[in-house]
């Protein structure tokens, strides 16, 4: 795909992707500012893999150019997720407090992001 084609594709799908990390957060974990957390992790990591700062393993699902595009989309989505996450605080705060009360203070994780990128063995 040429640079022009990639730009057209990103412009075409951008309205659909705006705030999508928040939508995933609301459907799954309901973490406070979970969409922003996801974008803040996926964006830089995807870009780093795309431009070669992070080694890509043989079993990698995406090509470097796809990783770079996903990272760029996540970073572009971040401000929209910040707004959407703020609007969804009435849903995420009670969910987080319920999780905290159920699990107890010993099980509380400050930023549970290991599900996105599990540690390599």
Image (cartoon, helix red, strand yellow):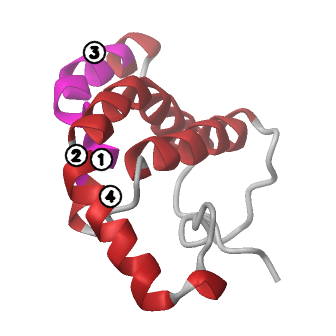
Which residue corresponds to the image point at 38% horizontal and 70% vertical from the top-left? 97
Residue 93 has which mark? 4
- In this orientation, does residue 29 appear? no
46, above or below 73, in the image: below
Viewer-closest of 108 and 17: 108
Q: Quarter-wise, where is residue 91 in the image? A: bottom left
The magenta stretch spans which residues?
7-23
Q: Secondary structure at mark 3?
A: helix
In space, the residues marked 2 and 1 are separated at their CA atoms by 8 Å
Q: Disc 3 or 1, which lies upstream in sequence?
A: 3
- Asked if the residue at tag 1 contacts the one at tag 2, i.e. Cβ–Cβ closer than 8 Å, the answer is yes
Residue under circle 3? 8
Give whichever of discs 4 and 1 has the lower sequence position: 1
Q: Earlier in the sequence, mark 2 or mark 4?
A: 2
Residue at the location (55% across, 46% down)? 42
Q: Residues within 10 Å of mark 1 (few under 14, many from 20)?
A: many
In space, the residues marked 3 and 1 are separated at their CA atoms by 24 Å
Q: Residues within 10 Å of mark 3 (few under 14, many from 20)?
A: few
Q: CA distance from mark 4 to mark 1?
A: 14 Å
Q: Position of residue 107 (x, y in %)?
A: 61, 85
Between the C-alphas of marks 2 and 4, the distance is 9 Å
Q: Nearer the viewer, mark 3 or mark 4?
A: 4
* 65 versus 102 height, above or below: above
Which corner quadrant holds the C terminus?
bottom right
Residue designated by label 1: 22
Disc nearest the viewer among 3 and 1: 1
Judge depth for marks 4 and 1 and give the one in front.
4
Q: Main secondary structure of the magenta part?
A: helix
């Amino acid at each position: 795909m040429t640079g022009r084609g990639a730009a057209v594709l990103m412009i075409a799908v951008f309205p659909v992707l705006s705030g999508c990390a928040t939508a995933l957060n609301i459907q799954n974990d309901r973490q406070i500012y979970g969409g922003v957390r996801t974008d803040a992790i996926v964006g830089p990591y995807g870009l780093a893999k795309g431009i070669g700062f992070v080694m890509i393993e043989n079993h990698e699902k995406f090509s470097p150019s796809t990783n770079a595009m996903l990272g760029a989309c996540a970073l572009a989505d971040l401000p929209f997720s910040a707004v959407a996450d703020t609007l969804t605080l009435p849903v995420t705060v009670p969910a987080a407090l319920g999780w905290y009360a159920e699990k107890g203070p010993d099980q509380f994780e400050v930023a549970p992001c290991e599900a996105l990128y599990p540690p390599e063995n």
